[in-house]
Amino acid sequence: MTEKFGPELMRGSLDLMVLSVLSAEPKYGYLIGQSLREASRGMIDVKAGTMYPLLHRLEDDKLIKCRWDDSTGRRRKWYELTAAGHRRLKQQATQWYEYSQCLMEMLKPILAVPPEPA
Amino acid sequence: MTEKFGPELMRGSLDLMVLSVLSAEPKYGYLIGQSLREASRGMIDVKAGTMYPLLHRLEDDKLIKCRWDDSTGRRRKWYELTAAGHRRLKQQATQWYEYSQCLMEMLKPILAVPPEPA
DNA sequence: CTGCATATGTTGCATAGCTACATATATAGC
DNA sequence: GCTATATATGTAGCTATGCAACATATGCAG
C-alpha cells in the first residue's frame, strides 16, 4: 500500500466521490467517511472538518437532502441524492472520466518508464 | 467537443501537467500554455495569472530552473526540469495514476449507465 | 498607426481542504 | 462507577491555489 492520497490530489473530486457513495443508498456523514475509506482500501481519508462543511455545501446547492434520525441515542443525519444530485453526479463523473483520459494520455510516456532498480 | 475543464477539476494536477510538458524539452511559460492546449485539444487552458505564479513556485522548490533569452526582441524565460523535478514528476504521475484508478473503480457503476436519450 | 498575438508579471478575490477545538452519546475494560 | 475509545456532528481560523483584472512591452499584419 502506498501513501494516503494528499488533499491537493483530491481537490476537485471530493464532491464527486461523496455524491458517488450516496448514489446507491442514503448514508450519514460519518458513514460516508467510512465507505470512502473502505472503497479506497484506506487511501482516501476525509477529515470531519472537511466532510461536514462539504455536506452543508451540497445541501445548500440542493444536490442532497437530509433527514435527522434521533430514534437512537446517536443523532444521525441521513443524506440522499436529489434528482439534481443524480444529474450532477452523472455529469461530473463523465467530465472527470474525460479529464483523466486526457491527462493519462499526457502521462503515458512518463508512466511507461520503469522505476529505477533499488 | 465538450466544455473546457473547470479550475476545480484541474486543481491538484496543474503542477503535474506543467512538469509533464517540460519533461521532453525546455519551454517558456507562454509556450507551455500552448502545449497544454494542443495536447488536450483545447480542453485545458491555463491562464497567465495561474501559469507564472505556478512556474515561480516550481522554481522556488528547485523542481525547474530557468534561463532568460534576450537575444530576440521577445524576452523569453526558458524552463527545464532539474533532477529533483524529474523525480517529482515520476512520483506524482504514479500517484495520480493510482488515484484515478481508485476513483474510476468507484465511478464504474455510474459511468456504465448510458445517457438518457434526447 | 492601429490592433492583435506574443510574452511576462502582480494584486486581490474566492474556494475548499486542513488542524484544532467543542459537544455529546455508546460501549468496552478495569 | 470510572475511564478511555469509537461514534457522531459541528465551527473557527489558516493556508494554498486558480482566477480575473490589470500592467508593461515587443513584433507583425492590415
Image: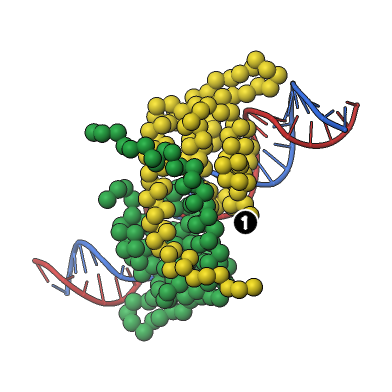
Chain colours: A green, B yellow, C red, D blue
**Left or right placement of residue A10 versus residue B44 in this view:** left
**Left or right placement of residue B11 versus residue B106 in this view:** right
- Residue A100 image position (x, y, % from top left): 48, 52
Q: Quadrant of the C terminus of chain A?
A: top left
Say whether residue A63 is visible. no
**Relative to A12, is C8 above or below?**
above
In terms of depth relative to the viewer, which is nearer, A13 or A78?
A: A13
- Most extreme residue toward the bottom, as rendered? A71
Q: Which residue is mark 1?
A: B2
The residue depicted at 68 percent of the width and 22 percent of the height is: B74
In terms of depth relative to the viewer, which is nearer, B46 or A4?
A: B46
Number of marks in the image?
A: 1
The residue depicted at 50 percent of the width and 62 percent of the height is: A93
- Residue C16 image position (x, y, % from top left): 50, 55
Q: Quadrant of residue B102?
A: bottom left
The residue depicted at 38 percent of the width and 33 percent of the height is: B87
The residue depicted at 54 percent of the width and 36 percent of the height is: B54
Q: Secondary structure at mark 1?
A: loop
**Relative to B34, is A101 above or below?**
below
- Most extreme residue toward the top, as rendered? B71
* Number of residues whose C-alpha sits closer than 10 Å to that of mark 1, classed few (under 14), some (14–19) or many (20 or more): few
- Residue A23 image position (x, y, % from top left): 45, 72
- Residue B94 image position (x, y, % from top left): 38, 44
**Relative to B1, is A36 above or below?**
below
In terms of depth relative to the viewer, which is nearer, B112 or D22?
A: B112
Amino acid type indicated by mark 1: Thr
Say whether residue A114 is visible. yes
Label 1: chain letter: B
